[in-house]
Image (cartoon, helix red, strand yellow):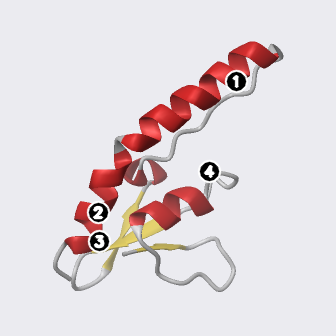
């Protein structure tokens, strides 16, 4: 379970939702539930990847394809995190 300190009316969300919700807000501060309390966390822990936009359209398209490819590796981690005991 994850929550964002900087989002207005932040509600606890799963790992995947935290990653997708913060693609446009990579500087937000987040926390992770440990079972007894929320600990400070970083967006890299939910596998947020930030891409720097380049002027060349072809190169940017290549980065988007790489992003989709890398995202496929997170599916099992997201599933495992959702099944973890609370």
**Height in image: 19 above or below 6?**
above
Cβ atoms under marks 2 and 3 closer than 8 Å: yes
Looking at the image, tell me whether mark 1 or mark 4 is earlier in sequence order: 4
Where residue 78 sits, quadrant-wise, is: bottom left
Q: Which mark is residue 25?
A: none
Looking at the image, tell me whether mark 2 or mark 1 is earlier in sequence order: 1
Give me the C-alpha separation between circle 2 and circle 1: 28 Å
Residue in view at x 24 percent, y 75 percent:
34
Q: Tell me the element at label 3.
A: helix
Q: Which residue is mark 3?
A: 82
Give me the C-alpha separation between circle 2 and circle 3: 5 Å
Residue in view at x 57 percent, y 58 percent:
20
Residue in view at x 40 percent, y 42 percent:
72
Answer few, some or many: residues within 10 Å of disc 4's Cα (few below 14, many 20 plus, some between 14 and 19): some
Q: Tell me the element at label 1.
A: helix
Answer few, some or many: residues within 10 Å of disc 3's Cα (few below 14, many 20 plus, some between 14 and 19): some
Q: Nearer the viewer, mark 3 or mark 4?
A: 3
Looking at the image, tell me whether mark 1 or mark 3 is earlier in sequence order: 1
Q: Which residue is mark 1?
A: 61
Cβ atoms under marks 3 and 4 closer than 8 Å: no
Q: Tell me the element at label 2.
A: helix
Q: Which residue is mark 4?
A: 26
Looking at the image, tell me whether mark 4 or mark 2 is earlier in sequence order: 4
Give me the C-alpha separation between circle 1 and circle 4: 20 Å
**Height in image: 43 above or below 66?**
below
Q: Which residue is mark 2?
A: 79
Q: In front: 25, or 62?
A: 62
**Height in image: 25 above or below 32?**
above
Question: Left or right: 50 with respect to 12?
Answer: right
């Amino acid at each position: 379970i994850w929550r964002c300190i900087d989002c207005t009316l932040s509600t606890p969300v799963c790992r995947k939702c935290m990653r997708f919700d913060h693609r446009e807000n990579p500087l937000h501060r987040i926390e992770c539930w440990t079972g007894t309390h929320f600990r400070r966390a970083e967006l890299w822990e939910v596998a947020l990847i930030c891409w720097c936009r380049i002027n060349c359209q072809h190169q940017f398209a290549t980065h988007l394809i790489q992003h989709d490819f890398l995202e496929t590796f997170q599916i099992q981690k997201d599933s495992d995190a959702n099944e973890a005991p609370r």
